[in-house]
Amino acid sequence: MITQPASTTPKTPDQKRFEQVQKVLAKVLVANLVVALSKVIIGLITGTLAMVADGFHSMMDASSNLIGIAAARIAGRPADADHPYGHRRFETLATLAIGGLLLVAGWEILTTAFDRLLHGGQAQISALNFVVMIVTIGINVLVVWYETRWGKQLRSDVLLADASQTRVDVFISASVIVGMAGTALGLPWLDTVVALMIVGLIGFAAFTILRHTSSILVDKIALDPNLIMRVVMSVPGVEGVTRARSRGPADAISTDVEVRVNPATTADRADAIVVEIERRLRAEISGVSEVQVQVAPNRTDPKDYALTARAAADAMGLSIHEVTEILSPEGRVLEMHVEVPPSLSLQQAHEKVSELEKRVCLDLNGAVVDVITHIEPAEAHLGAIMQSAGAVILRDRALAIAQELYPSATFKNPSVRGVMAGYALSLICQLAGTMSVQEAHLIAEHVETQIRASLPELRRVTIHTEPLDS
């Protein structure tokens, strides 16, 4: 019996990212448990309140690691029917829980400290206390460096919050050493004072974490709107930005923009603008994961006559080219070539094009006094490039004409294909890269005209210009 290998679905980048977060937290959990147990056990044996308090705080670090691991496992799940936007907010909830645990730890230490002030008590300090504290400080410094490095690399709020919590633990442990030194010198009250200072540090760390987390939950702005607008305005076709909003954590920012485009912009063109906006925001701004774009017409700028005409033609299923504006004594006239299905009768084509003329005049709202159209059949391609001897001869003769007209240019990749009542030729013309576009266009136009005049079988000649060094 042949068993088929089980198919495995490739993991998404988010799943891989949260798996790495879990691995980091698992390693930090082990370190925090070692640190916490060392402080609590030695603190209880010697009666050092500040050391016990610090150990309890380290125990909260370990608890936050467990919460972070569970949250990362859930947050890495893909979107589903119940969570169409994914599970990323579970990481935010875990960060909120870490802040809450810090507040609980601070309260426990505060009540113990007040009890010591009211009822007295003195710690028995030994060299072991100092050794344990110094070693645990070293471990915590390594944990902070490790979590911060991965937190920034993975852009994980949980890791950065946990690193911040452990960083506070370093300062707390240093304060505990000061308190123990005071007790050893005959100042037992210093142990209690240091414990109260620890409460203040814990409270500050909790406030920082809770403030950052709450800002995400209440959809506080995540990016400078001017930054979003600069990127969006760099997209060709965007004439203005009327809304630029953002929210979410640093590694999963959602943006919402509204842009203004020319009113005559076609649906295909608008879709291309939206796709480019999404691409540039994700590429140029780190952390952007979702982009919503709304397109609206810009009613303030003058109309683009050619774009308006093309939009009207698109709506009627027609194609136009060579749109030209002519200034006559009566006013502005728009001239264009209109391609219609070749199967139409002359009467049908005339009626269809007449309707297009009326639409263009209406859409331009009196900006043009007349629309002149030239009707021509839409090109019917006959398929693959023709390989007949006649097509090859035409190709070679056309290439020779072009090269004779402009010896300094390089003409290459000629191809001939069949079209209605003849052939169509296309080739590439390489010119100096420093030449202006206008000059290159005039050269291509001249070559096209001369080839068509010399070879009437070529119904259409298209020359693409590019720089010599491309």
Image: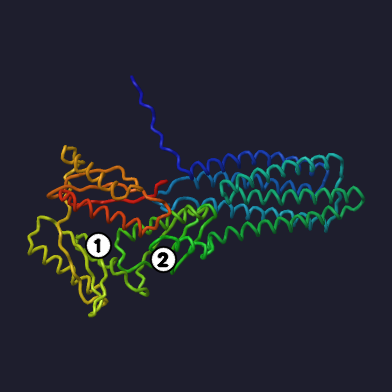
Q: Badge 2: how crowded within 10 Å, few (<14), some, or many (20+)? A: some
List the residue tagged with mark 1.
322
Q: Residue furthest right?
A: 186
For image coordinates 48% across by 43% down, the residue present is 13
Cα gap from disc 1 to disc 2, whole angstroms: 32 Å
For image coordinates 76% across by 51% down, the residue present is 172
What's the amino acid at mark 1? Glu
What's the amino acid at mark 2? Glu
Q: Is 184 or 156 nearer to us in this picture?
A: 156
Given this view, does label 1 or label 2 mark the residue nearer the observer?
1
Q: Quadrant of residue 198?
A: bottom right
The x and y percentages for residue 279 are 43, 53
Residue 123 vs residue 316: left or right?
right
List the residue tagged with mark 2.
258
Residue 50 vs residue 375: left or right?
right
The x and y percentages for residue 138 are 75, 42
254 w.r.t. 404: above or below? below
Disc 1 is placed on an element classified as strand
1 and 2 marks in contact (CB < 8 Å): no
State which tag comes first along the sequence, 1 or 2: 2
Q: Quadrant of residue 250?
A: bottom right
Q: Badge 1: how crowded within 10 Å, few (<14), some, or many (20+)? A: few
148 w.r.t. 293: above or below? above
Residue 264 is at least partly visible in this image: yes
The x and y percentages for residue 60 are 67, 48
Dot label at residue 103: none
326 w.r.t. 319: above or below? below
Q: Is 235 or 244 nearer to us in this picture?
A: 235
Residue 284 vs residue 68: left or right?
left
